[in-house]
Image (cartoon, rainbow, N blue to C red):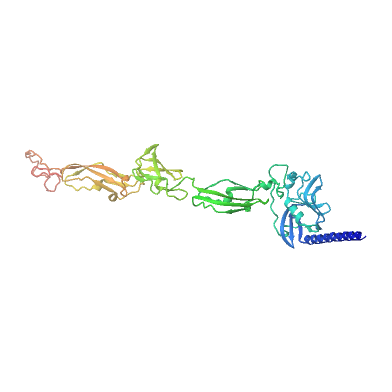
Amino acid sequence: MKKVKIKGIAMLLAVIMIVSCISIYKTEETQASGKYTIKVNLGTNCTTIYKNGKAVKAMICSPSSETPTGTFYIPVKYRWHEMIGNCYAQYCSRITTGILFHSVWYYKNGDKSTMSVSAYNVMGQKASHGCVRLLCKDAKWIYDKCPVGTKITIFWGNKKDDPLPRPSFTPIRNGKFTDWDPTDPDPKNPYRKKVPTLTVNENTVEYGTKVKPIDLVTIKDSAGNNIQKSGVKVKGKINTKKLGTYKVKFTVKDTLGMRLSKTVKFKVVDTKSPIIKGAKAKKDVPMGSKVNVLAGVKAKSVTGTNLTSRVKVSVKYKGKKVTVKKGIVLFAKKGTYKITYTVKGKNRKTATKSIKYKVKSHKVKLTLTNTKVTVTEGSTFDYYKYVKDVKSYQNKTLNIRSYVTYTGKVDTSKPGEYIVTYKGQYKKQAYTAVTKKLTVVVVPKTVVAPLPEEPTTPEQPTTGPEETTTGGNNGESSNETNGWTDFH
C-alpha cells in the first residue's frame, strides 16, 4: 500500500510539473507575441514589422485586392503547407481562415529548387489569391520571430503610412522556369555561392572629358541583375585634367545580402590630334611681297602642351611647290596659293590645316605725258613736268612729287640725248613700284645767218610833175634797210 501511495504521489507531482511548464511556456509565448506587431499596407505592397511600437523592418510583399483588411492574430504556423492549385509554400504563418503569410509557391512539397520563377518575379505587385506572399527570407523571419498571438493589421494606405521605405527587389533573369528563391538562407542555396560582379566597360578616359567612375563599369547582383548606381559606394576620383593613372574602389551589397568590393585602375590619356590656331586665309596678298606664313600660327595639344615649334608648312601654286625658307614665301605671281600646316603631337597624332592666299597686283599706275621730248640748249628742265599722274592699285590719285622719284640727269648745257627713269611707288613698298623711261633730246640754240645782197634796181622815169609814194607808209621808210631783211 505504501508503494502504491508513493507511486501515485510521484505521478501527481509529474503532472503538476508538466502543467506548470506548459503554463510558463504559454506565458513566455504571450509575452513574446506582444513584442512584435505587423502591419500590411495594401496600397504600397509593403509589410512593416514593429518592435515595442517602433518600426524596425520593412518587407516587400505581394498581397491581392482580395486580401482582407482588419486586425488579426497569428493562430498557427506551418513549415510547409499545401496551397490552392496543387502547390506548396514555405514558412507559413496564418493570418485568418484561408489567408497566410508565406513564401512564393513551389511545384513540389519540400523541394526548394522548384519555386515558380514567374511568381517570384512579380513580387511587389498584386499577385496572390488573398494571402500575403513574401520573399523566403522574410517569410522565415516572421515564422521564426513572431510567435502565435502576434498582432497583424492590414489596411489600405500610401507611402506616408510606411515609416520605412519598401525594400528593392531582385528578379531572376536566368531564363529558368523553376529555381531556388535567391533569398532563402538555406546553406544549400546555390545563390549563396554567387556574389555581385563588376565589369569594366572602359578603363581609359580621354583627357578633358566629363565622366563619373560609376559610368565606366557595370555592376550586377548575385542574381545577374544590374545594380542601380545609387546602391554602389565609390571611393576615389578621376582627374581628367591631368594625365595619369587613378584608383577607384567600388563597394556594393545587393538585396540578397551578398557583397562586392573591388578596386579598378583608370588611365587618363590623350589620343586626340593637336589644335592649330591662327592660320587664316587671305583674300588680297600683294604680288611680289614676301610673307612669313608662320607668323601668328600656334599649335598645342589638348592637354595644353605648346607644339608651335613643331609646326611645318608647305605652299603650292597651281599644283607645284613653292619655296619656303623659315616660313618666308615670295608670292611672285598672281593667283591662288594653297598653304598647308602640319603638326605632330607627342602622342603621335597629327593635325593638318589648309588655307588659301589670293595674290593680286598692288603696282601703282604711272603715266607720262610723252616718252620722248626735245628741249633747247640752255633751257631749264622740269623733271616732273612730264609726269601726267600716278595712282594706287585701287585707283586712288596720289601726289606726284610724294610718290614719284627719278634717276638720270639732263644737262641742258650740252646738246645730246638723255634718259630719265621715273619710279612710282606706294608707301615705300617695293612690290608696288613701276618705272617709266623718258628720252630727252637737248638741241643747240638756232644761229642767225646773213642774207646775200640784192642787185641795184635802175631808176625809173617819173610819170608826172609830182612824185607819188606807194606802200601807204605815210612817209615812213620801207622794210628794206641797207639791203638786209630782219628776221623775226
> On the rendered structure, is 381 left or right of 19?
left
The quarter of the image holding the N terminus is bottom right
Q: Which residue lies at the image location 69% right of the left edge and 52% below the top edge?
A: 168
Q: Which residue lies at the image location 69% right of the left edge and 45% below the top edge?
A: 190
Relative depth, front residue between 298 and 57: 57
Relative depth, front residue between 249 and 10: 10
Relative depth, front residue between 257 and 216: 257
Relative depth, front residue between 138 and 274: 138
The quarter of the image holding the C terminus is top left
Q: Which residue lies at the image location 22% right of the left edge and 45% below the top edge?
A: 408
Residue that extends furthest to the right in the rendered view of this protein: 1
> On the rendered structure, is 185 left or right of 320?
right
Q: How many dots with numbers?
A: 0
Residue that extends furthest to the front in the rendered view of this protein: 2
Q: Is residue 325 visible?
A: yes
How far from the left and from the top, in percent, is residue 200? Answer: 58, 46
- Identify the image quadrant of residue 410: top left
How far from the left and from the top, in percent, is residue 429? Answer: 32, 47
For residue 116, above or below residue 43: above
How far from the left and from the top, in percent, is residue 10? Answer: 87, 60
